[in-house]
Each structure stands twice: as C-alpha cells, then as structure tokens.
Image (cartoon, rainbow, N blue to C red):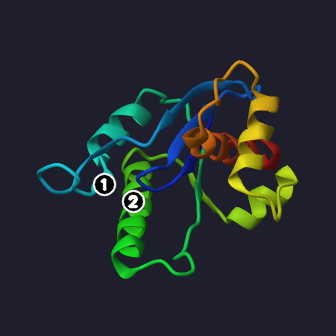
Amino acid sequence: MIIGIDPGVSGAMAILNDEGEAMAVEDMPTIARTKGKGGRRMVDAAALAHQLSQFPDVKLVLLERVSTRPGEGHTGAFAFGDSWGVARGVCAALGFPLMLVTPQSWKRRAGLIGSDKEASRALAAQLWPNINLSRKKDQNRAEAMLIARYGQVSK
C-alpha cells in the first residue's frame, strides 16, 4: 500500500493498494485549536495516527513538500507548517517509509503543471470513477490520491 498526503488543515490522505485502487480517501482529521465558535482548527495528531495505523502494510508514504504561499500571513504559514510537521511526525512514529514530493514533481508526472486544483479533481475522478469527488472541497482528496499515484509510478 502507498499513502499520499496533501497536508494542511483542509488537506486529505489517500491509501492505494498495490494495483492502484483506492482503499481509503479521507479528509485530514482536525480538532479545535482554541475553544469557542469560529476558532482555528489544527490537525489532530492522535486521530491521524489512529487512521494510518489501520494500514500496517504500508510500503511508502508520500507527503507533499510544501512551503509558504505568496501573500500568506505569518499565522497561516505557521499553522500550515505545523500541519505538515504533524503529518511527518506521525509517519515517523509509525515507522512508515517517507518520501517528500514537491507539487511540481507529482503534477508534472500527472500532466497538471500550470493547472488548478479543479483539474486535479477532474483527473482523479477519471482515474478512480468509483470514488465520489463531486464536492469542490474534494480537490484536496483528489490531490492526495494523485500524490499516492506518483509513488506507485515511481516504484
């Protein structure tokens, strides 16, 4: 099995079997960072570890190597980096082999250089028609699937 992770609070993870079939596709688990309504959320490390530990036969985890985005404020950048670090730490704690992959690398392999997230969703829907990716927010699930597929092709 290969896991692809699109990090971030609104990110997702996808698990593909050796034949490239989607075994699971889920949004990143989150918890409230602060109490009260409207508070920021953060990746729930314990829930992520629990979800990933359900798949002990993992051959490789591909985690998108991210950086700050143009115009992003320091609070958002720190939160995004925190989410990335949580995903990396959980994979290390579970003993999963980890490969960091740049967006340019997996998008080039998928033929998506210069495309938006909507193109990722359309391609993933075509490759895995049995997975429902009909919501706009499923773009992150689609990208997690394509990141995992990059690992399948790279083996």
SS at badge 2:
helix
Figure disc tally: 2
Task: From this view, report whether residue 66 is shown above or below residue 93.
Answer: below
Asked whether disc 1 touches disc 2, contact meaning CB atoms under 8 Å apart, the reply is yes
User: Viewer-nearest of labels 1 and 2?
Assistant: 1
Mark carried by residue 19:
none
Quick check: 100 left or right of 52?
A: right
Residue 75: percent from left, percent from top: 33, 75
With 126 as the anchor, is 74 left or right in this view?
left
Residue 84: x and y in percent read 44, 61
The mark nearer the N terminus, 1 or 2, is 1
Mark 1–mark 2 distance (CA, rounded to whole Å): 7 Å
Identify the residue at image location x=68%, y=48%: 147
Quadrant of the frame with the N terminus: top right
Q: Residues within 10 Å of mark 1 (few under 14, many from 20)?
A: many
Helix, strand or loop status at disc 1:
strand
Q: Nearer the viewer, residue 123 or 106?
A: 123
**For this rendering, which residue is in front, 154 or 133?**
133
Residue in the image at 65% along x and 47% along y: 143
**Residue nearest the observer in this picture, 63 or 139:** 139
Quadrant hosting residue 136: top right
Between residues 154 and 144, which one lies in front from this camera angle?
144
Q: Residue at x 49, y 28 (%)?
A: 55
Question: Is residue 155 found left or right of 46 in the rendered image?
Answer: right
Q: Which residue is mark 1?
A: 42
Residue drawn at 75 percent across, 29 percent down = 20
What's under tag 1, amino acid-wise?
A: Met
Q: Amino acid at mark 2?
A: Ser
Residue 83's tag is 2
